Image: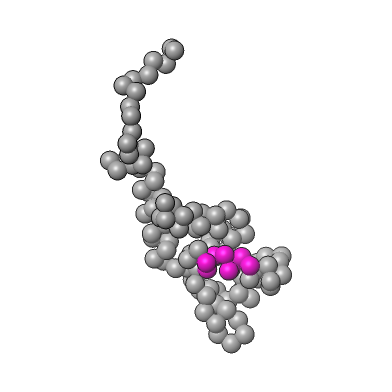
Amino acid sequence: MKEYLEYTRVFKALGDPKRAMIVDMLSCGELCACMILEKFEMSQSTLSHHMKLLCECGLVRGREQGKWTYYSLDKDTIDRTVQFLRRITTDKEDCICKEGAVFCGGCDEDE
């Protein structure tokens, strides 16, 4: 369950179109918050909220330089999230559906 909670935080953060767009922007490299702010019609406090959520789930890292924060993607989190998505969308022997499963032995679709 812990693993599911960890990665659903990432997907939840990406569930907002503006946050997904910010991640897309960061795919080109590190950006200053001011550069991100230029692309959106939002206040600095709203951007800070979005960036806080992206940082808390691990997708983005921020570093302070002077009065601005510079953001970049956390490649390790992205790689682990991609692997997790592949695991949960692929048939496997240790799938949770097979834990203690009682199979019906075949269902008749006409019933």
In the displayed structure image, the side of residue 105 where residue 68 appears, left or right: right
In which quadrant of the rendered image does the C terminus lie? top left
Picture coordinates of residue 99, whole percent (x, y): 32, 39
The number of callouts visible is: 0
Quarter holding residue 91: top left
Kindly give the residue lying farthest to the bottom in the view shown: 66
Residue 49 image offset from top left, x and y in percent: 63, 67
Q: Residue at x 71, y 66 (%)?
A: 42
Q: Choose between 1 and 54: the one closer to the eye.
A: 1
Judge whether residue 8 can be spotted in this image: yes
Q: Is residue 42 above or below residue 67?
A: above
Residue shown at 63% from the left, 76% from the top: 34
**Looking at the image, which residue sits at the far left?**
93
Q: Is residue 102 above or below residue 8?
A: above
| Residue 71 or residue 13, whichever sits in front | 13
Residue 88 placed where, x, y %?
Answer: 39, 46
Check the image and report above or below for 48 versus 80.
Answer: below
Task: Report the span colored magenta.
Answer: 49-56
Q: Where is residue 60 drawn, in percent x and y?
A: 50, 68
Of residue 1 and residue 75, the one placed in the foreground of this image is 1
In the displayed structure image, the side of residue 26 where residue 81 appears, left or right: left
Magenta region, main secondary structure = helix
Q: Residue at x 33, y 27 (%)?
A: 103
- In the image, 53: left or right of 81? right
Residue visible at 50% across and 63% down in the picture: 57
Indicate whether residue 18 is drawn in magenta. Answer: no
Residue 27 visible in the displayed image? no
Most distant residue in the top direction: 110
